Image (tube, rainbow, N blue to C red):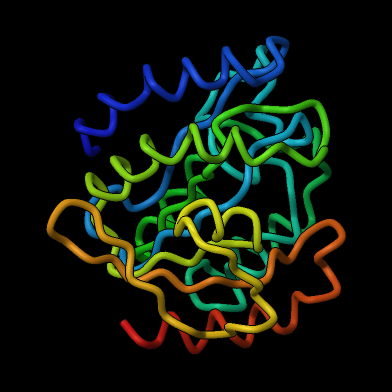
């Protein structure tokens, strides 16, 4: 456990209270919490994630109850195939806290960490205004500093643009490295297609790019 991560949770809770749906809980970054090979930076959690529900008694983490993202993790080499087969076989309501602990332990073992820029759970996958991502940026930079990933894969134009504070079109910068300065240290950021929802049409491109990016480190 990276105890320093506990320090940023109050700031994350505050953002969720301001912008999120009070009927759901916020999530925190999970996986390899110290010096991971790769940090995956997503958008924001939604109520489709079982661990956002108030009655959930296990780890609150990204993609609990989802299937497609775990197949992507498996395809790019940061998640065990047998565990992914089990993920794909489970119905949403059959996910257990024990199983979520197991899959996140495996993600950690592979040197991966998953988090999100938008610190507010929404009831659905509605588009969020940039101000939410802008206000979430400082706590994300602190999270990056504490976790200290070798590379960051940021998903989608909006997340990447707000993280880097410059307009980004993933389709025009595939596998391109951007340097994010936090204090005196530079972190390598690679924009990638968001491969779920409407972006599922780009999942093959995302996998192709992520395989090559992850091999860089």
Q: Residue furthest left?
A: 184
Residue 123 screen position, x and y as percent: 80, 26
Q: The C terminus is located in which quarter?
A: bottom left
Q: Determine the residue positioned at 54% across, 37% down.
A: 61
Q: Determine the residue positioned at 12% across, 58% down.
A: 184
Q: Is residue 112 above or below residue 146?
A: below
Residue 199 screen position, x and y as percent: 81, 65
Q: How many discs appear?
A: 0
Apparent side of residue 216 relative to residue 85 in the rendered image (left or right): left
Q: Determine the residue positioned at 66% across, 72% down.
A: 169
Residue 137 lies in quadrant: top left
Q: The N terminus is located in which quarter?
A: top left
Please tell me which residue lies in front, 97 or 38. Answer: 38
Residue 207 screen position, x and y as percent: 64, 80
Please tell me which residue lies in front, 205 or 49. Answer: 205
Residue 86 screen position, x and y as percent: 69, 57
């Amino acid at each position: 456990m990276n105890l320093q991560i506990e320090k940023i949770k109050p700031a994350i809770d505050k953002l969720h209270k301001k912008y999120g749906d009070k009927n759901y809980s916020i999530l925190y970054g999970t996986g390899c919490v110290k010096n991971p090979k790769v940090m995956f930076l997503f958008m924001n959690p939604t109520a489709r994630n079982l661990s956002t529900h108030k009655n959930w008694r296990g780890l609150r983490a990204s993609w609990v109850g989802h299937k497609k993202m775990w197949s992507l993790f498996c395809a790019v080499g940061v998640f065990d195939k047998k565990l992914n087969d089990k993920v794909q076989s489970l119905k949403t309501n059959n996910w257990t806290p024990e199983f979520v602990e197991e899959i996140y332990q495996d993600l950690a073992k592979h040197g991966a960490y998953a988090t999100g820029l938008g610190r507010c759970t929404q009831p659905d996958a509605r588009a969020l205004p940039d101000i939410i991502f802008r206000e979430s940026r400082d706590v994300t930079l602190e999270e990056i500093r504490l976790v200290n990933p070798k590379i960051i894969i940021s998903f989608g134009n909006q997340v990447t643009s707000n993280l880097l504070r410059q307009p980004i079109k993933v389709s025009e910068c595939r596998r391109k490295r951007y340097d994010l300065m936090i204090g005196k240290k530079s972190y390598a950021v690679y924009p990638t297609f968001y491969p779920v929802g409407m972006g599922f049409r780009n999942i093959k491109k995302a996998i192709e790019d992520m395989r090559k990016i992850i091999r860089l480190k």
